Image (spheres, grey):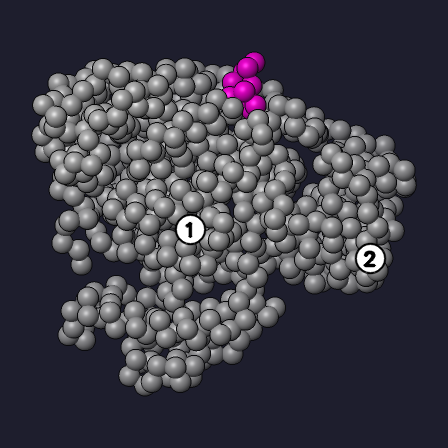
Amino acid sequence: MPEEGKVDKIPPTGKNRLVFEKSPYLLQHADNPVDWYPWGDEAFDKARRDDKPVFLSIGYSTCHWCHVMAHESFEDPGVAALMNDAFVNIKVDREERADIDAVYMSACQMVRGSGGWPLTVIMTPEAKPFFVATYLPRTGRHGMTGMVDLVAHIKTMWKNRRKEVDVASSQLAEHLETVFARRTPGTGPGVDTLDRAFSELAARFDESNGGFGGAPKFPTPHNLLFLLRYWKRTGEVRALEMVERTLDHMARGGIYDHVGYGFHRYSTDERWFVPHFEKMIYDQALIAMAYTECFLATGNGAYKRTAEEVLAYVLRDMTDPAGGFYSAEDADSEGIEGKFYLWTEKELVSLLGEEDARLVVDLYGTESAGNFAGEVNGANILHMRRPLEKTAEEIGVEPEGLRERLDGIRRLLLDARGRRIRPHKDAKILTDWNGLMIAALAKAARAFGEDPYAVAAGNAVRFILSSMRTGDGRLYHRHCDGETAVAGNLDDYAFLAWGLIDLYETTFDAEYLENAVGLTEKTIRLFWDPSSGGFFFTPEGGEAMIVRTREIYDGAIPSGNSAAALNLLRLARLTGDTRYDDYAEKIGRLFHEDLTRAPSAFTWFMSALELASGSSIELVIVGDPRSADTNAMMREIRGVYAPETAVLFKSSVEKNPLITRLAPFAASHEAINGRATAYVCRKRACALPTTDTREIVDALGGRRLARDLETP
């Protein structure tokens, strides 16, 4: 359904209707000879009038294979003529319209057993799919159907075998309805499910390279965040070893941008060596969280450095002046994947001189003929063949000295790379992905004692709450080129609330907690299913789809239901409102079958289950926020890895502070003799208040402040 008040426009010569859109992805296709429509009534009305099926193509602006399919088919006048004759053609940006993508990607996974982008769907004018696929070449090859043959085949089917098409599309729509809407709640997963999730991850763990499974290999940071929590509760050293080995190999691999920082989307091989070069803001956020938490857990300064470098990339290259964070950077530049990031040894010698170039060749594994079989002759991916400390030992220098030398080299390379043609940047701002980055920055500010991170997170919150909210407090999903549009989905509400909770526990500005509570209440009103529990992806009264999806699978990013479950549990502990515990429990009951069948596919929900399993701690600190003893206590507590702890702060010098209205139980908590005082409760049983910071750290299962430890 189109936005209210949107008037059909006639595109200028040589353009199609996508020219009127804001999405960078749609605008990339605005001059295709394919007569593209944006998703909306205009397209479906035309399909009904002309009695044609709808060809739906879903992708995103930094998708390499989306570009390939566009060049091969959508930019080809011959293919376009066939498509225009047979179909009404619709283009959708999957990042902008995640609700549409969720429906049809689910259909693809049901039919094909897998999915991906570009997503190709052919459907009836009633939006019921009867053909689904991903990338299709122009002509058939290697057993793949080609676009030219497909168009002819579908045209014939539509004309001569309509009844078969109608039956197939209705059956698939019915199956989608059964999967998403018709669920019977179970008893909910038990603590033993956590052990099975750990065992499943351990069975898939790559002992040599870290990570899980073979090629292609994705970072999937929420697996690591779950393992850290599992280790903290159980003491299972193997869980921590898997996290460290994965993070170590990722940071040394080609998946990491050793010159400009930040992680590429995934590795095409099992060694983290050859990346798919696009960079996504959600990867930076989740990966930064994993490195930050691993630093707190281990005290290893290498993890802190990597987290800081990732955030440096985000703040330098991916931050809008208004405060929000951009979505992604493309893999391609000048039509070649990875060209922006690759180096020849000749270039290295020219830029650095013989001596420093030899160091780069040795440490970063370059070859004169190139180590990357791409379109650039002699091209190399920089990757550390061994730990920096080992190289320092071999050449007889201190690691810190070598690190400083390499940073000087890196700056020269970054400056030279800055003169190249950059990959396309998708500058749209998405509420959900911004919520993840707000959470990552808040965690880093708390762990590292770095106020600029908290400031950047606060700026993003202010931008979203001022520019991406309706008058009645509902969220928009997307802001781009001055336009805010698209109704917010579950992920927008859940991920922003996640960021707000973390930002509260970093700054103790109660307005952040107040906004988190307000968003969560609105999430319950708009998305909760009162009949069987769980959250739908789209809001009540939103645009009608053939099915209203409801998911728990934690894929590239955690699901909205998993994130909401953990938010609810955290808010129950921060506010004392046990209603939130009940909602979280009902999510587990609704998805009982999925969660118990393959728990390692739901690791962010497993993190919620860790918190719900009885290991949680509530900590209230009362003190003067300006006093040295209060700040000293805060610093010590923030240096402890205690993800099971909800931390509340009450000012002892402020009359009727907002926090006592949000968390009424804190009203009776007072400072002892004017000193910073902590109240520690475990399993809803509270110990006597204490002013002894060492006692608090011990209660949290911590040790000396990680950032004060000797770092390599």
Give 359 or 148, whichever is nearer the viewer: 359
- Where is residue 555? Give x, y as percent: 49, 40
Q: Is residue 182 left or right of residue 649?
A: right
Q: Residue at x 16, y 36 (%)?
A: 627
Numbered circle sitting on residue 284? 1
Numbered circle sitting on residue 118? none
Q: Quadrant of residue 197?
A: top left
Residue on which disc 2 sits: 12
**Residue type at tag 1:** Gln
Residue 85 in view in this figure: yes
The stretch drawn in magenta includes residue 529: yes
* First of labels 1, 2 by sequence position: 2
- Where is residue 437? Give x, y as percent: 42, 45
Q: Looking at the picture, does residue 130 appear above or below residue 279?
A: above
* Secondary structure predominantly adopted by residues drawn in magenta: loop
- Where is residue 620? Give x, y as percent: 23, 25
Q: Residue at x 37, y 24 (%)?
A: 571
Query: Tag 2, which secondary structure?
Result: loop
Residue 368 in view in this figure: no
The stretch drawn in magenta includes residue 517: no
Q: Is residue 516 left or right of residue 28?
A: left
Crowding near pointer 1: few (<14 within 10 Å), some, many (20+)? many
- The mark total stands at 2
Query: Which is closer to the viewer, label 1 or label 2?
Result: 2
Q: Residue at x 51, y 24 (%)?
A: 522
Q: Looking at the picture, does residue 73 appear above or below residue 49?
A: below
Q: Disc 1 and disc 2: Cα gap in Å?
A: 39 Å
Crowding near pointer 2: few (<14 within 10 Å), some, many (20+)? few
**Residue type at tag 2:** Pro
Magenta residues, as a range? Answer: 524-534
Q: Is residue 466 left or right of residue 204?
A: right
Query: Tag 1, which secondary structure?
Result: helix
